[in-house]
Amino acid sequence: MSGRRWVAWVLGLMLLGSGAAEAKVRTRYTGVVNLNEATVAQLSLLPGVGEKAARRIQAHREKRAFKRIEELVRVKGFGKKKFLRLKPYLAVQGETTLKVEKVAVEEDETPPPDNPEEKH
C-alpha cells in the first residue's frame, strides 16, 4: 500500500471510530426543579418540557401555588405518564438544583436487550 493510501485508510478508520463514539452519548439529569419558584428557563430543562409547557406551569402557579408535585397533572399537556417521568426531578419547596449534562456511555454500561422469551 502506498504512503498516501495508507494515510487515507488510517484517517478513514479514525473517522469511523469517532462517529461511533459520538452516538454513545446520553443525557443525565440530576437535582430537582421547584415548581413554585423555578424560572421558565429552569422548567424547560426538565426532560420533554419545552418553553410553552414551562409557561403553562408558570401561569398555573400564578393562580394557585403547587402544594404537591402531583398537582402538575392539572396543567394542560401534563398527564399521568409525563408526570411519572418527571417525578424524580420535581419539588414544591427548596432550591432548584436541576442540572443537565451529556455523558458518554461506555460499552459495559449499556443494558442488555430484553429477551422476550424470559418474560412470564
Image (cartoon, rainbow, N blue to C red):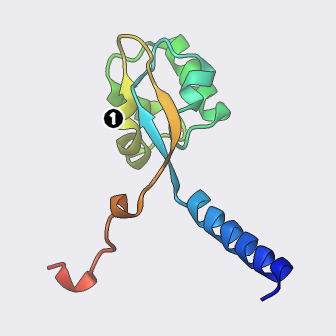
Report which quarter residue 44 is drawn in: top right
In the rendered view, would you say 91 is above or below 4?
above
Asked if residue 103 is positioned above or below residue 41 in the image, the reply reads below
Q: Residue furthest bottom?
A: 1
Q: Which of the image's four quarters has the C terminus?
A: bottom left
Residue located farthest toward the right when viewing the structure as drawn: 4
- Label 1 environment density (alpha carbons within 10 Å; few <14, some 14–19, many ≥20): few
Q: Is residue 67 above or below residue 88?
A: above
Image location (x, y in percent) of residue 100: 51, 34
Which element type, helix, strand or loop, lies under badge 1?
A: helix
Quarter in which the N terminus is drawn? bottom right
Q: Where is residue 96? Give x, y as percent.
A: 45, 16
Horizontally, is 65 left or right of 39 in the view? left
Q: Nearer the viewer, residue 8 or 78?
A: 8
User: Which residue is located at x 66 percent, y 31 percent?
Assistant: 51
Viewer-proximal residue, 20 or 93?
A: 20
* Residue 23 percent across, percent down from the top left: 58, 61
Query: Which residue is at a point 37% across and 62% down the rendered structure image?
Result: 110
Q: Amino acid at mark 1?
A: Pro
Count of number-bearing discs: 1
In this view, the residue farthest toward the left is: 120
**Disc 1 target residue:** 88
